[in-house]
Amino acid sequence: MSGQSLYPRLEPLLAQVQKPIQYVGGELNAQVKAWDDVAVHWALMYPDAYEVGLPNQGLMILYEVLNERPDALAERTYAVWPDLAALMREHGVGQFTVDAHRAVRDFDVLGVSFATELGYTNLLEALDLAGVPLHAADRDETHPVVVAGGHAAFNPEPIADFVDCAVLGDGEQVVGDVTDVVAAWKEQGRPGGRVELLARLARVDGVYVPRFYAVSYGPDGAIAAVARTRDDVPVRVGKRTVMDLDEWPYPKTPLVPLAESVHERMSVEIFRGCTRGCRFCQAGMITRPVRERTITGIGSMVDQGLRATGYEEVGLLSLSSADHSEIGQVAKELADRYEGTNTGLSLPSTRVDAFNVTLANELSRNGRRSGLTFAPEGGSERIRRVINKTVSKEDLVRTVTTAYANGWTQVKLYFMCGLPTETDEDVLEIAELAVEVIRAGREASGRKDVRCTVSIGGFVPKPHTPFQWAGQASAETIDHRLRVLRQAINADRRTGRSIGLRYHDGQPGVVEGLLSRGDRRVGRVIERVWREGGRFDGWSEHFSYERWTAAAAAELAPLGLDLDWFTTRERTQDEVLPWDHLDSGLDKEWLWDDWQDALSEEEVADCRWTPCYDCGVCPTNGTEIQIGPTGRSLLPLTVVGR
Amino acid sequence: MARQPDGPPPPPTVQKLRLRYAKRGPLRFASHRDLARALERALRRAQVPMAFSAGFSPHPKISYVGAAPTGAASEAEYLEIGLARRCDPEQVRAALDASLPAGVDVLECVEAAEGGGSLADRIDAARWRVELPGVEPGVLAAAVDALLARDEVLVAKRTKNGLRDVDARGPVASASTGGEAGCAILHVVVRQVTPAVRPDDVVAALAAVADLRPPSPPRAVREAQGRLDGSGTVADPLGPDREARARCQGEHAAV
Ligand code: SF4
């Protein structure tokens, strides 16, 4: 019978695995609805471990939005660690949801949110454990519709064989549209079977159904054309954009796990989108335009969320939180409201300017003043012009010094290496910068124990960005630059001990690059890696570079391609990119011009404060920038924990 | 010099409450750390006026006593909290219970009596009920007889310092059996020792003496914790606080 609990069969297995709590659900604010009361059943998956997936905002939002509908239910499922997966196969227990431990196989829709492409092997593992055919073509109308979402869905081509649909853009409204389509089709007695259902879904704005688009390749290996195979589906699929965030104050009751998770705090998204124009940043490009939540909207979400969760810390989330038009007032009024409680407020990593230190001081009024994070991203002024994240060295040092002088003892600086046009010298400037920051910081604060942590990872060019044409730096280049950087930092004994270096080596980035800019032919590489045991590729203890390179060589050679073709090769202007038929709103010509500007180290200003530079998003989507100030302020209220 | 928090030091503890709570159903898979985190959040949600330690990362005053292992359910977990403002214990119990996920249930709350000694001093044994699915009661009864006939049975146990042989028989104060066809039940009272002897150690001892090997993992529930008295029963560790309270209310009534 559909929708039955697998728990009685799962329970004996849980006694034999690591951290069983992650599989039992029962989180605060979790919901279980009766199976037979609703028409459409959604399983929502985050394809990584529970501790990483549970705090994911996107999934939490859709979980609430769907469960609020009287005709739908949503339950969550996460990647299962290999110890439990082996027991599940041995005992014939399928991939299950943590809420009511129902079989994923029984659901109408399996929505998978991809924050990163490294979750692809976990998708295959979950499908296989669920008893759902890996290939979309092999599924019938009794199988769930597998829908990919999240940022990686803007190029779902590498997983086109495994998913039935991909959804572009904001999920809040489109999940409702998909629910309506599935409900109507079921109600009518499933006319036309699975193909008809998918055809109907393909006509929903923002839904891409890969099987209705045929890809052909030219003699050089590049894509010749992508053509739709039925004329009732769009030529290009656009993205969805929620315009008024205040109308979508989700999550209202964030999930609070018993198990430890990566974020021991709740988050409130204060705006969506970003027009700073950092050229490496896919998130900024594909989420345009900027849409702010109002100060009053933020205030009530913080209040309601704290009451619903009991968390002690609230993160004010966005791509660049200090850019909210009323951030000064938001910070001050929230700090006033929670003064004298143990509630901490925080902004994620910030742009480098003095205003951010002021903000951080305000938010830390309750006493926690330990670490502050800045993200200059590029080591030299030159490379920062290339990536359009311009800040001078003097400003950088001055800002960090101000932080130390204000009592912050730990400053973390985020960088990338392997950026287009980068040389060793650009990266070596990071060391100079760190040394200078420590010297000036000691002087300004009068303390010897100020610390600076340099955190650096390899850059991966992403679709729908000006760098989508760039050749990716090889793993060897990345590892070489990290090595010279480490030597340079350690060279100065007087400061070396105050500077920490955290880095990710280059190999996983190459695989991420293959999966980010790959086309449908990369699917067979993913499948081979999974068949050979690849899982949890985001975890260094599970990731195997050799497995990926061997699989890529074996699967791509017969096609006359190789790993480099997808990663280190620079693309030309006329090349058909695998995601060209997926429309993020950005004008391809504008992207190309911005790429050329990057190469000539030319900057572009933010369209919030300077005139529109015609990236294409607003006219394509009929959207507009939504920013304040609103001039409103927060009302006083009684506060939890005072 | 380290920066000091501005403002006055946190208010002192004016009342200590002792709570008994259960972990039930799927939440038996919660570890002690998981439970501690959930309890601390629930105390905030319930707006219990906790007393805090001083300093930059003030901690609420909570002390836990002898947590049941991950995978074992319990009807008798204990903790003590310090409050900055006096509260009605029953109201605290109800508010906290409502703020916790179903499966972590707050069963009792009493005020600690002045000078009554610590909660930890009132606990030196636990009574367990262990279900053994797939084991016949007769088989279990014979194995338990074999165990009780010994003075010592060494089992390998994973401790912080690696595998170690511990005596799983010595701390067993009493054991009896029951259950029905297809699922035997072991009732066992175990004294508190270091390293702790848990139900799975006792089951391992049954395997050692009688080759009893349950086909699927046993399910243990801790039914009680407290002092083992002369008659072999485990006394209620909140009893003395409750009696003191009753006495004191009696005195008030007499006035
Ligand atoms: S279209 Fe113009 S206003 Fe809209 S996001 Fe692009 S640059 Fe900014």
Image: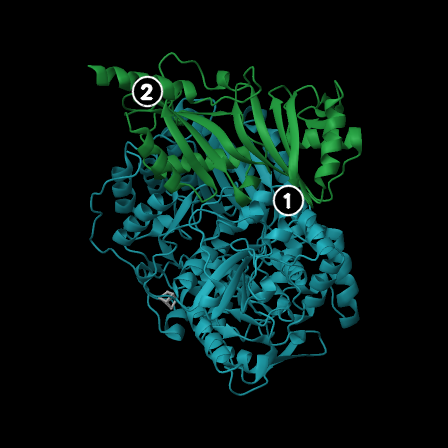
- How far apart are the two marked residues, 2 and 1, measured between alpha carbons? 74 Å
Helix, strand or loop under label 1? helix
Tag on residue A481?
1
Q: Colour of chain B?
A: green
Look at the image and give the colour of chain A.
Answer: cyan
| Left or right of A392 on screen, residue B146 | right
Q: Above or below — where is B202 with respect to A128?
A: above
Q: Which label sits on residue B58?
A: none
Q: Amino acid at mark 1?
A: Arg
Q: Does dot 2 land on a helix, a strand or a loop?
A: helix
Q: Nearer the viewer, residue A355 or A198?
A: A198
Considering depth in this image, is A20 or B186 the residue closer to the camera?
Answer: B186
Name the mark on residue B246: 2
Q: Quadrant of the C terminus of chain A?
A: top left
Point out the frontmost of discs 2 and 1.
2
Q: Amino acid at mark 2?
A: Ala
